[in-house]
Amino acid sequence: MPRELFAPVLGYEGALEMKIVVLAGGLSTERDVSFKSGDMVARALRRKGHQVLLLDVFMGYGDAECDISDIFDRAEEVSVRVEDIPKTAPDIAAIRAGRKDQSKTFFGPNVIAICQAADIVFMALHGADGENGKVQAAFDLFGIQYTGNSYLPCAIAMDKGVAKTFFTAYGIPTPSGITLEKEERQDAAKKAKIHYPCVVKPACGGSSVGVTIVEDPGRLEEALDEAFYWEDEVVIEEYIKGREFSVGVMEDQVLPVIEIAPIRGFYDFKNKYAAGSAVETCPADLPQETSRLMQKYAADVCKALGLTTYSRQDFLLDESGRIFCLEANTLPGMTPTSLLPQEEAVLGMSYDDLCEEIIRISLKKYQK
């Protein structure tokens, strides 16, 4: 990225080195994935010459009385150490129990103060309390600058049932479905006239955790048990048999379509993050008109939900050539197997440059 384009957005006349918090972890099912994204982003931004601290939003740093005045001088030393992504979702109860101060506050010790001392927070959070707008809203109140979209578009996109309503209103095709609350599951499931096969998934989950493809009525209760284990609200939608695709959008630029073809099963947690579990092709092998229509729908999703910085939309293409939008991701993954970096690479942008570009376009919302 040309540095002369970067400086004016940052508001710096001379030094371009920034103090950056890469915020990761949290209490979602995507906690471990978030750390992997955060670790890669932190390394990339350090290579660009910035002072970067990788911080766990839930565990925080030190005790409440800890001196953090020189923390960016010790950024690499105190950053979270990251291992490979496990094959299963994290034990959230054990993580809660492991916090030293046992506070009920989502933000760990010193998180807000450290983020306030940074020039910007790079949001590497994924899943609930990372992508649902709550952290973004809190940061707005604390005067903390952060990457990605503002709180309201994040909240809308995170709830798959609500997002479907917006898709339909804007003419974006999406699988038909219903939303169920835990307390109404018995009556509502019977009245919904569900057709099989169908898909049952947590309304605000990510990385396909808790998702089940249900072939017949006898498996529905088991699938609901699995989805309700993770959340109190689930979506039941029609199953679309077809090919899986994703389309990233960076500000006003729609990226090339990427196809994801799992070697076995569907694009679940394991296939998303285990190397060699899926074949990813970018640009996707599609007729030009199909690619263009899918890209148009990706841009339409941004307009419908109010996404202005960067995002990634997931699609299915059925056997008759119909396109269906599944969801919008407001903080796309940045792991070794993530899709957005692969799409940008096709256009010639390196991973390191992509991380700085996300900061550059995100800072624009603070110039208004």
Image (spheres, grey):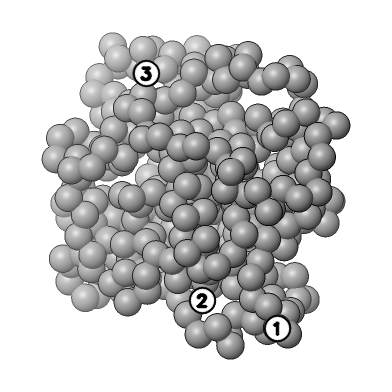
Name the residue carrying label 1.
Answer: 14
Decide if residue 86 is on the left or right side of residue 167.
left
Label 3 crowd bin: few (<14), some (14–19), many (20+), radius 10 Å: many
Percent position (x, y) of residue 166? 56, 53
Closer to us: mark 1 or mark 2?
A: 1
Q: Amino acid at mark 2?
A: Asp
Label 1 crowd bin: few (<14), some (14–19), many (20+), radius 10 Å: few
Residue 262 appears in the picture as rendered: no
Compare residues 313 and 216 and report the one nearer the observer: 313
Label 2 crowd bin: few (<14), some (14–19), many (20+), radius 10 Å: few
Q: Quadrant of residue 226?
A: top left
Compare residues 142 and 193 and report the one nearer the observer: 142
Secondary element under disc 3, as helix, strand or loop, is helix
N-terminal-most mark, 2 or 3: 3
Percent position (x, y) of residue 248? 41, 63
Q: Is residue 28 shown above or below 232? A: below
- Which residue lies at the image location 57% right of the left edge and 20% below the top edge? 95
Name the residue carrying label 2.
Answer: 252
How far apart, in angstroms, are the residues tagged by discs 1 and 2? 28 Å
Name the residue carrying label 3.
Answer: 223
Closer to us: mark 2 or mark 3?
A: 2
Look at the image and tell me in which quarter the C terminus lies: bottom right
- Which residue lies at the image location 21% right of the left edge and 75% below the top edge? 288
Q: Amino acid at mark 3?
A: Ala
Secondary element under disc 2, as helix, strand or loop, is loop
Decide if residue 92 is on the left or right side of residue 140.
left
